[in-house]
């Protein structure tokens, strides 16, 4: 049997290699991966575990919370608060940050997550996931919300777990992107792909087409050109995919290329977009860039944006480099 590399072995190699991954960060990633395993078990049980349906509450963004949103949030907090590697956590499902309680030692990292991304797919048995981002708390002050307001370029690690036909953990510590698959019998994450690379060109786009009438002209121009196919200016036919779980759409792009967009639109003109900068767009942008892709808000690189609020929203265009650059150029021309 060929030698299988576990997540633990991969991280220890990163500790010894040029990345010199700090041991506290290794612990943090292992704890997050363990929490994702617990969430994967709940997701798999579905109705048998009484985890489907709504919880009867709303989150800070006014969205109805599903039972699994809350379960996943609790699993991540409980798993991470006692290990001594974190100063605080922030989540899509919590209004304010969760500071590590005094009874535990405080570490030097900050963890942000969307505990259960793609909530509208939970009850219909379609792929969902967990997205996470890790920052360093190094300002010497007591941890507060402002400690989290760092640009995406400050991330020291990011990843997601997609709960689909397989449970897959995709990770970057700034040394490329690696993929692990959960071996359910062994209960371990096994390295199944190293050095993921997104092709620079693609013939596949992902966008919620039902919002077309609300889009800004540059987005409409790009999609119109894709839809025109071989006979149009692009001279090739395009295919469309939309899972409505960002984790699943980004996973497809990391696997075979493509472009994903959730742009600003006129439904709520005062909001920059639907997706959240700090625990959705930034970690996905870090992964995509590490795999040779690009990620912008239509005008600027997402990871360069200085956040002003924990739950800030952003317009997202990410994936195959040449397509992202084209969409970004269309936005610049329209300015
Ligand atoms: P969530 O974090 O509450 O699940 O919302 C984010 C999700 C993304 O995963 C996905 O890309 C998008 O919302 C789907 O939106 P829509 O319902 O407009 O298709
Ligand atoms: Mg989400």
Image: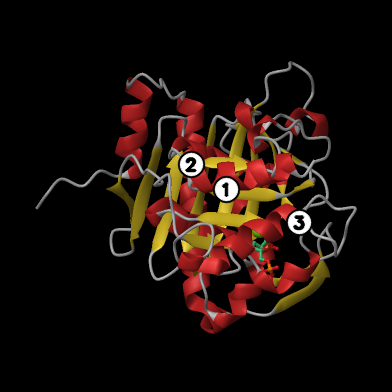
Left or right: 39 in relation to 291: right
Q: Secondary structure at mark 3?
A: helix
Residue drawn at 64 percent across, 34 percent down: 303
Q: Residue farthest to the top?
A: 140
Q: Which quadrant of the rendered structure holds the C terminus?
A: top right
Calculate the distance from the C-alpha at mark 2 to the C-alpha at mark 1.
Answer: 7 Å
The answer to whether residue 7 is visible is: yes
Q: State the count of labels.
A: 3
Q: Position of residue 13 (x, y in %)?
A: 31, 29
Q: Nearer the viewer, residue 286 or 113?
A: 286
Task: Determine which residue is flagged by label 2.
Answer: 293
Res 325 quadrant in image: top right
11 vs 68: above or below:
above
| Disc 2 and disc 3 in contact, CB within 8 angstroms | no
Task: Determine which residue is flagged by label 1.
Answer: 318
Q: Position of residue 215 (x, y in %)?
A: 76, 61
- The label nearer to you, 1 versus 3, is 3
Crowding near the residue tagged with mark 1, few <14, some 14–19, many ≥20 C-alpha atoms within 10 Å? many
- The label nearer to you, 2 versus 3, is 3
| Disc 2 and disc 1 in contact, CB within 8 angstroms | yes
270 vs 231: above or below:
above
Q: Nearer the viewer, residue 168 or 196?
A: 196
Q: Secondary structure at mark 1?
A: strand
Task: Determine which residue is flagged by label 3.
Answer: 217
Calculate the distance from the C-alpha at mark 1 to the C-alpha at mark 3.
Answer: 18 Å
Tell me which colouring the rendered structure shows. Answer: secondary structure
Calculate the distance from the C-alpha at mark 2 to the C-alpha at mark 3.
Answer: 24 Å
């Amino acid at each position: 049997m060929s030698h299988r590399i576990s997540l633990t072995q991969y991280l220890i190699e990163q500790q010894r290699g040029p990345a010199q991954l700090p041991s506290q960060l290794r612990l943090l990633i292992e704890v997050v991966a363990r929490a994702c395993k617990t969430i994967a078990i709940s997701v798999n049980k579905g109705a048998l575990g009484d985890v489907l349906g709504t919880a009867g509450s709303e989150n800070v963004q006014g969205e109805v919370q599903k039972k699994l949103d809350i379960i996943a949030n609790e699993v991540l907090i409980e798993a991470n608060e006692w290990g001594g590697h974190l100063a605080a956590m922030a989540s899509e499902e919590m209004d304010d940050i969760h500071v590590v309680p005094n009874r535990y030692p405080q570490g030097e990292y900050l963890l942000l997550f969307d505990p259960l991304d793609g909530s509208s797919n939970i009850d219909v048995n379609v792929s969902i996931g967990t997205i996470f981002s890790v920052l360093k708390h190094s300002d010497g002050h007591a941890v507060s919300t402002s400690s989290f307001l760092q640009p995406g370029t400050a991330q020291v690690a990011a990843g997601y777990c997609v709960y689909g036909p397989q449970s897959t953990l995709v990770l970057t510590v700034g040394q490329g992107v690696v993929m692990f698959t959960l071996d359910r019998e062994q209960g371990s994450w096994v390295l199944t792909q190293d050095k993921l690379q997104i092709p620079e060109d693609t013939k596949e786009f992902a966008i919620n087409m039902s919002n077309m009438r609300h889009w800004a002209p540059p987005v409409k121009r790009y999609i119109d050109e894709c839809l025109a196919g071989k006979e149009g200016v692009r001279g090739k036919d395009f295919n469309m995919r939309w899972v409505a779980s960002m984790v699943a759409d980004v996973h497809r792009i990391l696997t075979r290329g493509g472009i994903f967009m959730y742009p600003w639109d006129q439904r709520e003109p005062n909001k920059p977009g639907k997706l959240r900068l700090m625990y959705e767009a930034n970690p996905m942008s870090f992964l995509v860039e590490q795999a040779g892709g690009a990620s912008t808000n239509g005008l600027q690189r997402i990871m360069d944006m200085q956040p002003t609020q924990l739950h800030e929203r952003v317009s997202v265009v990410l994936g195959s480099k040449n397509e992202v650059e084209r969409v970004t150029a269309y936005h610049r021309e329209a300015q």
